Amino acid sequence: MKIKLLLIFVSISAFLSAQNTVSGTVSDENGTLQGQVLVFNFNKSQSVFSDANGFFSITADVSDEIRFVKDGFYRYDFKVTAESFSEKNSVIIRHVEILIPEVELKFQPTGNLEKDAQNVGVSKRVAALNSKMDEYMKSPMTEAIPENATPKSFQPHDFKEGQVNLIGVADAIGKLLSKKTTKANYYETRDFLARLKSEIDLSYYRKFGMGDEGIDRFLLYAEDIFMLSKKYRKKFDKVRISNDLMSAFGEYRKTNSLEY
């Protein structure tokens, strides 16, 4: 009997020792500790957030890939090695540079500040449309989110089934982008969203009870925040797109009731 108990104790000890954890702190390039950083283990589909002191601890094995994501910062990838378990890891995430958008003047300046000032800024029509789109993105769903929804396969250029005013919203975006600019036009945005849904793995977001309609709303939100079609329509980088979606989802969850 004593031998059996000893074997059970040894087995439990071996099992517990196999549960390795990687821990450390997250800070920015200035040395400021960063809380609420999403720490995601891709190999185990597990995630945690760093605390107010920047500390994190997550289960991992050797060769696992851990990603650190926070809005306003570049994503950082960390490859787990044998040494990662025996030392305190210091992770540094860097701020994203803020780009000032280019302003195109459609009038010839006269030199009279009072007259010229009336032609500068966003038109009332564009401002009203931006306001309506912002309200649409933040409004809660009126339909019940289906449980255990079965994913559908979407054919490119087919936006009729399982969509919530996708063409209408994309058309509104197209009107804003109709002038000559580096932004994607209506057709480029439409084709990019179709390709995104067919080539990017969105199964992680469905774990939060999001069906096809919920996925559509989130992708439009991510497009509005990160301008994905402008950045990736010519060079479709799946890794960078997935990173931006993960960062956008952190903000999306703050204004939308989601279940996990």
Image: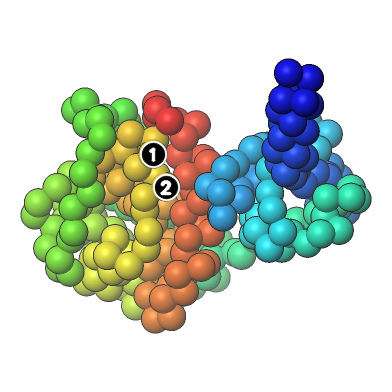
> For this rendering, which residue is in front, 204 or 240?
204
Q: Which element carries disc 1, helix, strand or loop?
A: loop
Q: Amino acid at mark 1?
A: Lys
Residue 207 circle label: 1
Residue 148 in the image: state x and y as whole percent.
Answer: 26, 34
Above or below: residue 10 compared with residue 166: above
Name the residue beneath numbered marker 2: 204
Work out which residue is located at the far bottom of the displayed protein and give it. Answer: 234
- The residue positioned 34% from the left and 42% from the top of the image is 206
Residue 172 in the image: state x and y as whole percent.
Answer: 23, 55
Work out which residue is located at the far left of the displayed protein and give it. Answer: 160
Residue 150 located left or right of residue 85: left
Above or below: residue 70 compared with residue 140: below
- The residue positioned 36% from the left and 50% from the top of the image is 203
Q: Are marks 1 and 2 in contact (CB under 8 Å)?
A: yes
**Distance between the alpha carbons at the discs numbered 1 and 2:** 6 Å
Residue 252 located left or right of residue 28: left
